[in-house]
Amino acid sequence: MLKSVRGMGLLVGGLAVGMVLAGCSDGAAKPSAAVSAPTGSVPTGSVPGNPSSPAAPPPSASSVPSTPVAPTGAAGDAQHPTGSYLKTLLPTRAGAAVPGVSGTALPSGWVADDNDEHDSGPAAAATPAPSLVGAGTCDYLNAKGLDLAGSYSVAGATEPLNNGNSPAGVGLYAYPPGDAAKVLAEVRKSTSTTCQSFTAMQQAGAVTVDVFAAPAGGLGDEAVLVRVAPQGPYTGQENLLVRRGDLMVSVHADNSSGSYPDLSKVAAALLPAMG
């Protein structure tokens, strides 16, 4: 596991992964200079090439933490923001259909592994989850599956996905009023300052990891695509975070197959079920 220090802090050990740019790219030219906002993780395996270029910084988001409230379902009825409820909105292996949303399914080429779903259970947490970035370090970017949506959530449900040879995953999270926007604001701030670039120690020596974030237009109330891009022949990761009200969908993938799949299509397929 990598350890980091503020700014160009040192990370020890580990696994660094991708980051996002504007619109969920495929593995094109490798990024070099850090820009905008949200997250990343550290390199692990070798991969043929690192992606693309950063986009302009995303807009800021406000935060107003409070107490949990039931979101409105697609049919207009009040739904409880529990893990058990969110699990029903995840794609299923059979036809990859989203329950309750007629005609909605995962994009062609995507497969859901609903045999490995996890959720937080039939009750929302009394206390929101702690902030991922609150420690002021870049350690939160060291996850193998880059999911930056967990901060301040009171319920969640996740499952693995696959696109061809690209391992991926999706999560749905519920928050107290205003806290979903707070998550995106914190990720943007951290990845544009302290964790815009950092150093990871690999067996071959020090590796510079650049982190990029940019708004992803046309999705939900606001969306941010984050890419963590280690320089050299290492695996990168992307994480697309899309907020709709006080719910968030998080889709992540790496470029171990040589390119990144289009995460925006998965998020767009799930948004109708989020009310």
Image: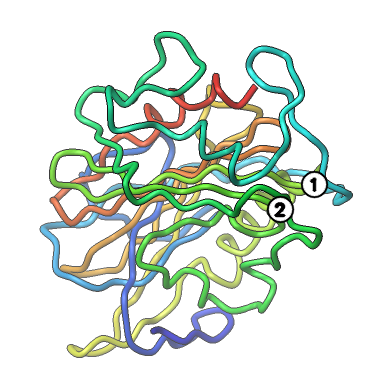
* Identity of the residue furthest to the left in this view: 48
Instruction: Name the foreground residue: 230 vs 100.
Output: 100
Q: Looking at the image, how many numbered discs can be counted on the residues?
A: 2
Question: Which circle marks residue 154 in the picture?
Answer: 2
Q: Which residue has dot 1 on it?
A: 176
The location of residue 235, given as percent across then percent down, is 23, 63
Few, some or many residues within 10 Å of mark 1 (<14, 14–19, 20+): many
Q: Quadrant of residue 273?
A: top right
Few, some or many residues within 10 Å of mark 2 (<14, 14–19, 20+): many
Q: Is residue 198 above or below residue 64?
A: below
Quarter of the image with the N terminus is bottom left
Could you tell whether 57 is left or right of 102 in the image? Answer: right
Q: CA distance from mark 2 to mark 1?
A: 7 Å
Instruction: Name the foreground residue: 84 vs 9.
Output: 84
Specify the amino acid type for callout 2: Val
Residue at the spot 13% in from the left edge and 46% down from the top edge: 165
The location of residue 94, given as percent across then percent down, is 28, 27
Quarter of the image with the C terminus is top right
Which element is circle 1 on?
loop
Could you tell whether 220 is left or right of 78 in the image? Answer: left
Q: Kindly report which numbered mark, 2 or 1, lies closer to the viewer in this rendering.
A: 2
Residue at the spot 51% in from the left edge and 17% down from the top edge: 100
Question: Which circle marks residue 61 in the picture?
Answer: none
Q: Quadrant of residue 231?
A: bottom left
- Asked if marks 2 and 1 touch (Cβ < 8 Å), the reply is yes
* Identity of the residue furthest to the front in this view: 122
Residue at the spot 61% in from the left edge and 67% down from the top edge: 193
Ranked by sequence position, the earlier of labels 2 and 1 is 2
Residue at the spot 23% in from the left edge and 23% down from the top edge: 108
The location of residue 23, given as percent across then percent down, is 40, 33
Q: Is residue 245 above or below residue 104?
A: below
Specify the amino acid type for callout 1: Pro
